[in-house]
Amino acid sequence: MSQNLKWLYANRALRSFATAFLTVIFPLYLAVSGYSAAKIGMVLTLSGIVSVVLLAGVGLFGDLVGRKRAIVILSLLSLIGSLVMSGWNNFWLIVLASGLGGVGKGGGAGSGGSWGPLFPAEQPLLTEAVTPENRTTVFGRISFVGVLAGALGSLVAAIPEILHKNGTPWLFGYHLLFMFSALLSLLMMVVVWPIQEAHKSWENERLDNDAPPPINVRQLTQRLGLTNALNGLGFGFLGPLLTYWFYRRYGAGPAELGVLYTIINLSTAVPYLLASWVSHRFGAVRAVTYTRIISIACLAVMPFMPTFWLAGLGYLLRMVFNSMGMPARQSYAMGVSNPRYRSRVAAFSNLPSQLTAMLSPAIGGSEMESFLDFPVYGAVFFMGLNVIAYYFAFRHIVPPEEQNRSSPPPTFGHSASKSRGS
């Protein structure tokens, strides 16, 4: 099934391209439409409920019926959501449409689109297409594709401002981009269609792996759920709310934010390719821990920066180090889980983060009225707790590829597309 990789890469590229400009423009679109900071936070919180329902549904649907089908359905829902946002700004319609459209569910600049309800369907398909030794490499490569696509998508966020300078109303420019997002959702359905998903592929995979999973599904889900809940609280203070923070703190408009996010996406591309080497050098759990500590420190200095671009540099460095550990974290979860339940593990271990991420935007948006930097400090606090909890939860659990440390470190030229039984 190694031929599936190119279609998964193409789907990630389209999704990241759309997510990049939607993350920038959505809170600004709400502000132009007359929404206050508190109301913007409420929209993001309530739309998260839709994402939680979708995430749980994909976890069950993917394992039982098919992960490819789950991606097709999610792309269709995203298309519908984008079309609704292109024509209406009613509060409840925006809540529903943004939830279906995945607005703010792509992890932000530099994340490569590694977030949201589609995640539990995509991860198992990637894992099934490669050997355990190459799994982290492929997770890094698809994020590499995602950030490059996201860099181009961030530039698109400048279109409403460019049109406005030429006499076009702000709302027209934003509605135009929502319609463009709908077109991209249609293309996502097209590129995922050729994927060939073997039924019960986990049975063949278990024959290839003599050793049973090092942790049972319930324990793995619970531990990941706890750590992800803390991370969700932290990320919820950032996400689309961060673009509003830049707007309020430094007066940055969509054009400046689009350029910053483009630079961040380009800067985080190479670290994704380094993820496999870092994971091999330190082990997956330590690689995640070390890179997250540095990234949190970079985030903590942002409110002290006197200018937009210096604060943007702090955010860029945060995303660079975060990118080094992200593929290792994703690959590790798939590597230590039972192949039959990978969609469920990916979905229900991330469900707590979706729930807690719903709380943070409303709290952060409300507190910004009196303490503008509150979302940044809230993110630092909960992400710090996440790192501590993650290390102590998984420091003794070793994935299959780390059980034999005599193999040489992976290189960029090493093939990562060897099929599992196909």
Image: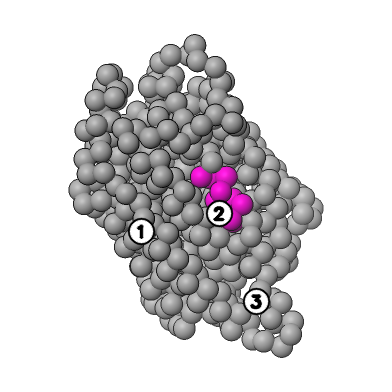
Give the spatial CA distance, label 2 vs label 3.
20 Å
Of the two numbered discs 1 and 3 on the same chain, state the one appearing first in sequence.
Answer: 3
Q: Which span of residues is magenta-colored?
A: 142-150
Task: Point out residue 357 in the picture as x, y percentages from the top left corner.
Answer: 43, 52
Question: Disc 3 marks which residue?
Answer: 160
259 lies left or right of 421: right
68 lies left or right of 414: left
* Residue 6 in sight from this viewpoint: yes
Q: Residue at x 27, y 19 (%)?
A: 210
Q: Is residue 138 above or below residue 193?
A: above
Please name the amino acid that badge 3 sits on.
Answer: Pro
Please name the amino acid that badge 1 sits on.
Answer: Trp
Question: Disc 1 marks which residue?
Answer: 193
Let me know if residue 261 is in the magenta part: no
Task: Point out residue 163 in the picture as x, y percentages from the top left corner.
Answer: 69, 81
Q: Residue at x 42, y 33 (%)?
A: 418
Question: Disc 2 marks which residue?
Answer: 108
Please name the amino acid that badge 2 sits on.
Answer: Gly
